[in-house]
Amino acid sequence: MERQILHVDVNNAFLSWTALEMLKNGSKIDIREIPAIIGGDESKRSGIVLAKSMKAKECGIKTADTIYQAKMKCPGLKIFPSNFKIYKENSNKLYNLLLQYTDKIERFSIDECFLDMTNYLMNDTLLNKGKEINKRVKEELGFTVNVGVAHNKLLAKMASDFTKPDRVHTLWEEEIPTKMWNLPVSELFMLGKRTVPKLYNMQIKTIGDLAKSNKEMLAKKFGKHGIMMWEYANGIDNSEVKYKPEKPKGIGNSITLPQDISEIEKLEEILLSIADQVGYRLRKEKMYANVINVQLRTKNFIDTSHQKKLPAPTSSTKEIYKTAKEILKEMYRKGTPIRLIGLRVDNLTETEQNQKQISLFDNLESTENQKDKEKQKKLDETLDKIKEKYGDNLITRAGKMQVEDFVKFKKYEIKKEDKKG
C-alpha cells in the first residue's frame, strides 16, 4: 500500500511563538511585522541570530549571523531573548492538535513533525488533510506552518521547504523532475556542506544532475553516502515515521467542513465517519473508552462541547456513535451553521469491564444483547483488517446500506483480489 506522509514545519517558530506570548501579555506590537530577531546574549561574542522576521530578512539578516552583524545590517533592529519554555509549550500544542489526525507522529525537531496518515485519511485525500492542518494551526494556535504532502518522508520534507510561509505543497513522484531537479544540489535533504563543493567539482550543480549521475561512481567516491545521495535525488526513501508508541490518555478526531452545515442529518453522517476512525484507533491501542465528548464550532468560531459517561467501557464503533449521536441531538441548536465537528473519547482503560464488582443483574444481561455485542466486535475486527491491508479510503460505514451486507461484499472482493495476486 502506498504510504501517505505529511511534514509539518512551523514558519519562523521561535520568533512567531515569542510574538504570540508578547501579544498574550498585552503587547501592542506584533514583532513578526517589524525588523526583529530572536538572538543569544548580546554581551557574549557567541550571540547569534536564531530566528528573524520577514522585515529583518529583507535587510539581509540571516540565521546564524552574529548579533553584531545583524545590527550593522539593520540599525533599527529589535532583539528579543530566546525562551525555550514558551517554545516547548507551543510545540506541545501543535503536537496535540496533530494527534487528532494520527497516532504515528515523529517529532523531527521542536518545530517539525512527520505524520504517517496511511490508515487515517477518513475517506479524504492526503492533500485535503494537509490543507486542513495548515488552516487549523493558523486559526486555533495563532501561528503558521508549511505542510509537505508526499508518499515518503524525504519528498514530504522537501515539499515543506518550498515557497514560504503558510503554504501547502505536494511533491508526488511524477512531480520530481519539475519541482525538485532544478533546485541547487545544496538544497537536497541530508547533504552536508562539505559535500557540495566536491559535487560542484564533478559538475554536479543541481539535484537533477545528481539524479542522472552514475550511482556506482558516486558510491566509489562517497561510499554509502553516495548511494543515499543518488537515491534521495531520485526521490527514493523507504524510512519509516519513527514514533514512540505510548498509551494515549484520550483519542479524538475532528473535521473542518469545506462549507458550513446546518442540517443535523448531515452532521450525523460526518460524526459516523469520525466515530469509525476513533473506534479503529481505540481498538488498535487495545483500549476502551469510558467518556464520549462531542465538539462543535460555529461559523462565528464559537466552540461548544458536551460529554457523557458510558455505563461500561467500550471500543465498539456502534456504541461510540450511538452515544455521540445522542450528545449531538442534545447540544445542537437547529439551523446553526457548523464549520467544525469533533469527537473525542477519554478516561481510557485497558480492560473492558469496570473495576467495580459485577452485580448479579450485570451477569443476567440478555443473551440477545451479548450476541449483538459479539457480532459488532467481529464486524469491527473485519473492518479494521480491511483498513489495515487496503487503506482507509477503500471502506466506510454506509448510512443507508446495511453494514453487514457491505462487509460481506468487501470480503468477496478481497478474496477475488487475493486469488488474482
Image (cartoon, helix red, strand yellow):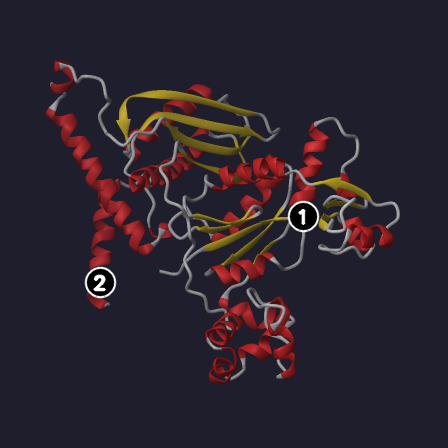
Q: Residues within 10 Å of mark 1 (few under 14, many from 20)?
A: many
Give 263 or 125, whichever is nearer the viewer: 125
- Asked if one can make out residue 259 in the rendered structure from this viewpoint, the answer is no
Give 198 or 229, whichever is nearer the viewer: 198
Relative vertical location of residue 256 with respect to residue 75 in this rendering, above or below: above
x and y percentages locating residue 65 in the rendered image: 75, 55
| For discs 1 and 2, the disc positioned in front in the rendered view | 1
Asked if marks 1 and 2 touch (Cβ < 8 Å), the reply is: no
x and y percentages locating residue 62 in the rendered image: 75, 56
- For residue 171, side relative to residue 398 (left or right): right
- For residue 167, side relative to residue 174 (left or right): right
Q: Residue furthest right?
A: 75
The three-letter amino acid code for the residue at tag 1 is Asn
Q: Earlier in the sequence, mark 1 or mark 2?
A: 1
Q: Residue at x 72, y 31 (%)?
A: 23
- For residue 54, side relative to residue 229 (left or right): right
Q: Residues within 10 Å of mark 2 (few under 14, many from 20)?
A: few
C-alpha span from label 1 to label 2: 48 Å
Location of mark 2 (residue):
418
- Asked if one can make out residue 121 in the rendered structure from this viewpoint, the answer is yes
x and y percentages locating residue 39 in the rendered image: 73, 46
Relative vertical location of residue 323 with respect to residue 413 in this rendering, above or below: above
Q: Residue at x 76, y 51 (%)?
A: 45
Relative vertical location of residue 225 with respect to residue 251 in this rendering, above or below: below
x and y percentages locating residue 220 in the rendered image: 48, 83
Task: Return the mark for residue 12.
Answer: 1
The three-letter amino acid code for the residue at tag 2 is Asp
- For residue 175, side relative to residue 271 (left or right): right
